[in-house]
Structure formats: C-alpha cells, structure tokens
Amino acid sequence: MPMQSPPPQALSTVAPSSPENPWPQPHRIANDSARTPAQPQVAPSSPENPWSVAFVSGKIQGWIERLGAVWVEGQVLQYSKRPGAGMQFLTLRDLNQQASLDVSVFTSVIEASGVQIEPGARILIYAKPNFYAANGRLSLRAMEIRAVGIGELLAQIERLKNLLAAEGLFNDALKKQLPFLPAVIGLITGRNSDALHDVLKNSRLRWPEVQFEIREVAVQGPSAVPEVMRALAELDLLTHVEVIVIARGGGSFEDLLPFYDEGLVRAIFKTRTPVVSAIGHERDNPLIDYVADLRASTPTDAAKRIVPDAGELRSEIKEARQSLARNITNLLERHQYQLDELRSRPVLANPVTMIDNRVSELQYQRDKLRHLVAAKVAQADGAIGSLAAQVRALSPLATMQRGFAIVQRADGAIVNSYTEAPAGTTILVRLADGSLVAKVVGATPPK
C-alpha cells in the first residue's frame, strides 16, 4: 500500500502536496515562531559571541526536519544503478530546470515501485528532506516512487500549450518569413543521427551549393533541452546563418518530451533567425511546432521545404523560356498578319488612289459650289432687276419723262398750289433732263 502523505509542517499558505498535487519546486518555509517547538534560549550571535558551525548546522537541520514528508515531481537527471547495494542515489531535476536535488532511496523501494528509473524519466516521489550536518548537504530520502502517467503529462502539456497561446507565442502574424534560397543553414540535431544525414543528403541533392552550420546535441534525456537551447543561441548569433532547423527522427512520446519544454519554446520565440521544426513523424506535434516559423513533418520534409530543387528550377526555367519563346513567336506572327492585312488594303497598296478619289470629289464639290453660286447670283440679279423696274415705275423721274415737272421755290419747298408762288416769286422747274429758273409773272386760279 502506498504511504499516506502527512500534512506538511511549518509551510507558507500552499496547498498540501499529494500525488495529484505534487510540489514542482521548493516552497518557502514560513517564519512562524508560534509553530516552533520550545527550544533552549540561546544568546544571539555577535562578533563577540559567534555560533559554532555545528550549532548552525544543527539549527538548519531542525528547520528542515520540520518540513516533513512531501510529494515531489521531477525529472531524473542522473542515475547509476549500484548492483547489490541496499541504497541507490539519483539526482532529481525540476521540470523547468531551475533546481535539482539529490535523492537517496532504498533498492527495495525502487523494486517495489516497478518504475523504470533512467535519465529523463519523470517520476513522483514521496520523500522527506534530509540535511547532513557533517558536510552541509541537503538531499531527499524517498519512501515511495511512482511514474508520472501519460494522461497527466498530456494534461500538463495542454495547459502549457493554452498558456503559451494566450501569451501570443503561437501567433501566425509574428512568424518570420523563410529565405527563398538560404546560403547557410543552421542545423541542430542528434549526434550522427539519421535526421542529420537525411537533412544533409536531401538538401545537397536539391541544391549542392548549400552550406551548413551543424550543432550535434542530445535530443532526448535530461541534457537535451539545455544542449538544444545552447546550440540555438549560438546559431542565432551567427549573422551568416539564414535559417535554423531543429531536427530529430521518430520516437516514443517520452523520447520527444524535451521538445515540449516551455523554456525551449520561449527560446525559439525570441530568436531573430527563422526556425524550422522537424521533429518526429507526421503524427507528432511537440510544442515547438507551434512556435516555429515553419513546421516540417519530418527532417526530409524540412530539407524539401527550405531548399529549392535545382533540377526542378532548371526544368521550370527551361519551360518558362520555351513558353516565352512561343509567346513571342505567336505575338510576332499575329502582328505580321495584321501588317500584311493592312498592306493589302488599296489605300496602302496604292496611296495615290486615295488622293485621286479626293481630287475628283473636290472637283465635283467645286463645280457644285460654282453652280450654286451662279444660280444664287442669277436669282439675285433677277430680283434686283425687278426691284429696279419697280423703283423706276414709282420714281418721279418717270413721270417727268412723260412731260411733267417739279416746281420748287428758292428755299427748296415744292410748290403744290398757285397760291404758294405769287407773282414775282423765283421758282426752280425740274424737268426730266435738267432744271429751269423762272420768275412768276401771274397766276390763274383753277376753273
């Protein structure tokens, strides 16, 4: 039966640790003198009254022992099995790699747990802090060990994924554009791994001139995350590296756990160089896939998506040149046909014809205009003659030509009555062909 975890002693207000709620990192011990058991009064330390090392170690040991047994979750960093030994020793690291503690455990406890203890494994331990006063070393004495289930790991990963997404680390708008033809590719992969050979082989088959800055690191186990992060930082500082590929072949879910690490995800997000994730197979989706600027389903796929195929480009260029030549030929033929059509038209075959036609038309219009003008002149001449005849018929001159005359006094007034020209009046008699000056010698009244 698993041991029941007693409530922790003298802790700050933190939920008690349990298999369901292990403490992922150390918690502050509350400075609560009310919970401190009665101890002998000791004079405060001073330059004149210093405490001995043994005394200080004893006080530290007393405080640590007050913590009691707790459930702790972590990742096995180091473990070397000691065959035949009753006690085994391992190092447990915090999941965010901020701290680590030595753990001692009886071999019988490990055997009873049925858990496979190996570097990189995530486990739960029920342990009591132990401070060895002789050398000031702090460790944990494990009394029970449990494996962290896949279901719990998936739930933790999903919570972390939602947290990072809420912070905007997976925002597509923030992803960097990959270069069309990178001259130098940074490659982070396992030592002498298939992924390394796949990326190199397929990249150079597609574009032989491509160069690589390679960093071979651990891609599983407790040292994978710090090594990958260190290589990522190194490559990101190299200005000639245009894109970074993190590649690893397939493996179990546990083998790929380093690529779900929060610290690694945040490190990729902060890089200035575009990052390509090529982890596992098509079905694998570690968290770095979401933050990477490009996700490739496999290392081979990464090579195909980063480096263009020289053969395909040559073929495309050849096809483009042939298509361009056909289009130019068709265009020239079409324009030549249009030119031939234009040249075959009469106006271009014999341009003088157009001028002759216009000359004939101008002559016709000129003759027509002359005829119209002559007709208008004749019509106007007839009208003038008619008007002249009317004027002549109505003119006094016509009357005078029949023997009549116009009599005027010297002042120019016309004499209309004999009373207007008494005897002795000088008058002017206007005839048809001249005038007479006379003087009236007498007048005869009308009969």
Image: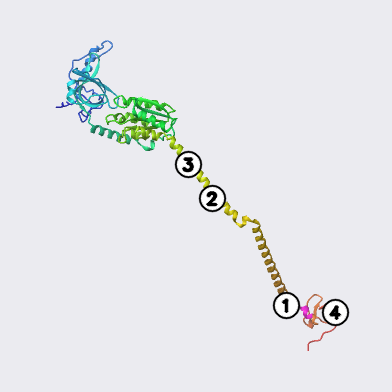
Mark 3 or mark 2: which comes first in sequence?
Answer: 3
Looking at the image, is mark 1 or mark 3 nearer the viewer?
3
Residue located 62% across and 57% down the image: 347
Instruction: Specify whether 419 is left or right of 352.
Output: right
Among numbered discs 1 and 3, the one appearing first in the sequence = 3
Question: Label 4, on which residue?
Answer: 438
Dot in front, 4 or 3: 3
Please report whichever mark, 4 or 1, sits nearer to the chain's N-terminal start.
1
Quarter of the rendering containing residue 269? top left
Q: Position of residue 130 (x, y in %)?
A: 21, 19
| Circle 1 residue | 390
Neighbour class for label 2 at 10 Å: few (<14), some, many (≥20)? few
Q: Which residue is mark 3?
A: 320
Say if mark 3 contacts mark 2, CB within 8 Å.
Answer: no
Residue identified by numbered label 2: 334
Of helix, strand and loop, which one carries label 1?
helix
Q: CA distance from mark 2 to mark 4?
A: 105 Å
How many numbered discs sit on the rendered protein? 4
Distance in Å between CA atoms under marks 4 and 1: 33 Å
- State which region is magenta: 395-400
Of discs 4 and 1, which sits in the foreground?
1
